[in-house]
Amino acid sequence: MKTCELLAPAGSLEKLKIAIFYGADAVYFGAKDFSLRARAGNLNQSEMKEAVSYARAHNAKAYVTVNIFARNKDIDRIMDFLSFLSSIQPDGIIVSDPGIISLAQKLAPQIPLHLSTQANTMNYQSVLFWHRLGIKRINLARELGLEEIKTIRKRLGDVELEVFVHGAICIAYSGRCMLSLYLTGREANQGHCAHPCRYSYAVQEEKRPGEYFPIEEDQKGLYIFNSKDLCLIERLSELVNCGIDSLKIEGRMKGKLYIATVVRAYRATLDNILGRCPKNFSMEKIRAELKGISSRGYTENFFSTTPKLNDMLYEGSKAPQLFIPVGVVLKQGRTPVIRANYVIRPGDKLEYMGRGLEDRNFQIVAIRDTASNEPLAMTTGGETVRIETHPAIYFEEYAIIRKKNSN
């Protein structure tokens, strides 16, 4: 069976390292500009250089997003940025704008180009068109079903194909949406989406200003554009069998627990399909893991049928989250140094997320200041501390510590 790449989002350098720790074959990230997630943490040039080196050192690939639809005012800075990318040599540049494609081929000709889903590539003739222009990999439009994907693969056997398998879905063709610009003045296609599809809406009669009528009987209003999140974890074998080269996870603006959980779940499922038999694997555990993180509920979108009403989330902007990210391990060992993202105290019962599907429960015995080694009564979030635990398990660098959400 053909090997298939697992591609994970990296909204920051730390998230990149977490994604690689949990099994990503490749990561994609953007700079402060020219990326469709301008409000993610993103990486500065020094961090991007480190990201490429770190990925290579851990047998992973690093792709950089330059996938905005550029205006005239952007061109000079994009040219400088492409020259910088030529100097650090990532494994690919993700693009969608024909002008940027042309500039990248001139200024960084040695770096493969990957076509973003923003290009709305929906048929084999479009794939062929882009391939003839020098594009190495095509991320297919999210609106394609399995049979359409199979047709493209059969007709064009020598083109790399990439498919989104998990993450947020825009109410627009592959994310080319103008709603944010019209409602907030922030242009999504320049990387500044305000996510108005997730807002609560209500009806107002023109002669009754300030008097709102929810279409659904819900005090929160109406979430009329709010699609459930894409999840194709149950369909990975079909994508692998039809010859997809890369399975892509959305989420550069998501948190560390999301990255760790989703990458780990898809890694284990993909390994199981490829015959690597991960320890403790079961689809029941995978489903429970994905249910435990922040999401809007899940849908298979267009994969086998046209989305229906139950593929939307009308009850709120998100489904409940079953786990809380407590911290990330910064220095490994049996008394690890962690960055605490949440309030923790001695006596707290927490869970260590192992590299595979092996979780370890433990209790905090002591929390110590990393400089003075003095004991602390608690963390408030954001501190770097050393913890002592029972049992004294071995914590690996960039692993996540979590706890069950009691709310």
Image: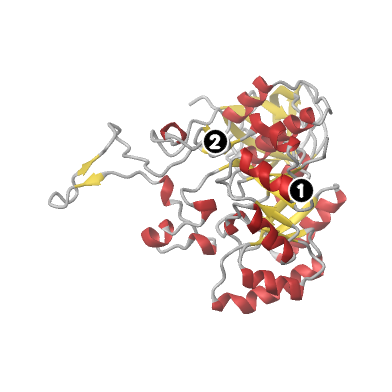
Q: Give the percent coordinates (x, y) of residue 176.
A: 51, 57
Residue 72 position (above or below residue 186): below
Asked whether 380 or 82 is in front, the reply is 82
Residues 298 and 253: in front is 298
Residue 316 shown left or right of residue 281 in the figure: left
Residue occupying image coordinates x 62% and y 34% = 232
Q: CA distance from mark 2 to mark 1?
A: 23 Å
Residue lying at 69% horizontally and 73% vertically, measured from the top left: 102
User: For residue 294, what is the image quadrant?
Assistant: top right
Q: Identify the amino acid type marked 1.
A: Ala
- Which residue is pictured at 64% across the width and 76% down the height? 77
**Does residue 401 appear anywhere in the picture?**
no
- In the picture of the structure, the residue carrying the numbered disc 2 is 294
Q: Quadrant of the N terminus?
A: top right
Q: Position of residue 378 (x, y in %)?
A: 61, 34
Q: Is residue 86 above or below residue 166?
A: below
In the picture of the structure, the residue carrying the numbered disc 1 is 26
Instruction: Check residue 182 in the rendering and tell me which mark sits there, or answer none.
Output: none
Q: For the point 65% across and 70% down, which residue is it?
A: 100
Q: Earlier in the sequence, mark 2 or mark 1?
A: 1
330 on left or right of 378: right
Taking the image as drawn, is residue 329 in sight?
yes
Residue depth check, mark 2 versus mark 1: number of the one nearer the observer: 1
**Callout 2: helix, strand or loop?**
loop
Q: Amino acid at mark 2?
A: Ser
Tell whether 218 sits left or right of 398.
left
263 with respect to 226 (left or right) = right
